[in-house]
Image (cartoon, rainbow, N blue to C red):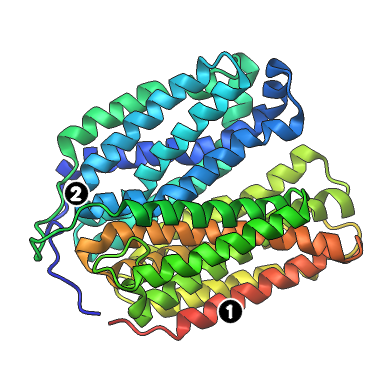
Amino acid sequence: MAETSDHSPQHFSPRSYPAIFAVLMVLVMTVLDGTIVNVALPVLAADFNVSDSDTVWIVTIYQLVITMLLLPVSAIGDRGSYRKTFLTGTLIFTAASIGCALSPSFGWVLVARAFQGLGAACVMGVNIALTRLIYPKKVLGRGLALNAMVIAISTAAGPTIAGAVLSAASWHWLFLINIPFGLAAFFIGRAKLPANPPKENKSQKSFDFLSAVENMVVFGLLFYGLGMFSRKENPWLACGLLFIGIVVAWLYVRRQLHIQEPMLPVDLFRSRLFSLSIMTSVGSFIAQNVAMISLPFLFHNRYGFSEILTGLLMTPWSLATMAISPIAARFVEKHNPERTAACGMAVYACGILLLLMLPGEGASVWQIAWRMALCGIGFGMFQTPNNIVMVIATPLSRSGSAGGMQSTARLVGQTLGATIVTLVFAVTASGVSIAVCLYVAMSFAILAGAFSISRKSS
């Protein structure tokens, strides 16, 4: 696919720092709010007098709304303005945070969390597009690496920040702390974020509301059905929702094939480079989530580590990813990103294999920690180069759709990973289920590496 003319800046200067700061600040907020609430669920259950299973909806509805709306808000950014979409999302997210903190009932919390998901979708859907406009093409990898590093830090720090806040204040402050940062990001972004580049094709159709509805139905039914499997709820209802979701998905894709700039970017999938990058991304996040979910059971059940130590043993992974991402970004400025990403998946697979080779009893913290760090190094070597390949495979005018599809691929991979762990635990004996999960993770890493090495840059 031939890329359209690049309207990103030719030179990087300190004047770009406020725009970068605004984007990263809201990205931190949206990622943190996906994990920070988990620690407070028991407190919320007691405060609102609801069951533990009901409080899980506070997490589920946030993730579900993001998944359903990523592609529609990305399409809005492509047609209108990435800047306005980002600023609107920031305002919605900040206002919804106030709503969460002031909610008088559990139902109000869920409604406010759904609006937080809408705001987060607006931010995540255009994050890559704005990054592409802020950074010159020659250092774009550094911008994508910085995004990946911020996401890794936010994900790792979520439980710690939540624990610190709850030790000093009520759960309401988990949401209230978003307000000053959200307002600061909004005013900085309004002043400093770049506008969309001029379109080569001036004729532009209105927003496709039917496609938006179809997209929400498809992803809502598929992800909720898969979530029911993960939560071990009614399997017949879950199968029914998945079946309806697949039928609607078939109709949705057929319709998208005949649209000039489709919401589901089937036009981008005609690029072999883009389609292989999406498959690589899905496979890698399946590999990551299968391991991340099953490994705590290994540390806690087999080796008898406490919950606190088990959590600390997961930290080297995130820290290693954070450290290696900017190095990988600089490396691929002069070297092949597809091969670098494939090497990353190979290193990741080696890390998983070494975890499988741990002794049956008496493994030390050090023996586990360096293996976890190796997995993080491999994923850091993969993530930024893969993002770079995916971005350069698309025209600048379709950056929103490409970024939305990139985030969707991550969520699809993570959801499928969680479902796979649930199924493995359900159909295998308890003594071998963790090993089976790790073999599955290693297999998907090898598959993602194979997809990556088969790509050829346009």
Looking at the rendered structure, the secondary structure element under dot 2 is loop
Give the answer, above or below, for where 83 lies relative to 274: above
Residue 422: x and y, percent? 76, 57
Residue 191: x and y, percent? 16, 33
The quarter in which the N terminus is drawn is: bottom left
Q: Is residue 59 visible?
A: yes
Q: Is residue 361 left or right of residue 207?
A: right
Q: Is residue 53 left or right of residue 378?
A: right
Q: Nearer the viewer, residue 39 or 254?
A: 254
Give the answer, above or below, for where 189 lies relative to 351: above
Residue at (61% x, 55% y) in the render: 317
Hey, what amino acid is under mark 1? Leu
Looking at the rendered structure, the secondary structure element under dot 1 is helix
Residue at (32% x, 55% y) in the render: 128
Which of the two discs, 1 and 2, labels the residue nearer the N terminus? 2
Residue 311: x and y, percent? 71, 43
Residue at (25% x, 65% y) in the render: 261
Q: Nearer the viewer, residue 210 or 18?
A: 210
- The local crowd at label 2, few if under 14, some if 14 to 19, many if 20 or more residues have their Cα within 10 Å, is some
Q: Which residue is mark 2?
A: 80
Q: Is residue 303 visible?
A: no
Give the answer, above or below, for where 421 lies relative to 187: below
Residue at (29% x, 55% y) in the render: 208
The quarter in which the C terminus is drawn is: bottom left
Q: Are marks 1 and 2 in contact (CB under 8 Å)?
A: no
**Mark 1 and mark 2: span between their CA atoms?**
37 Å
Q: Nearer the viewer, residue 52 or 212?
A: 212
Q: Which residue is mark 1?
A: 447
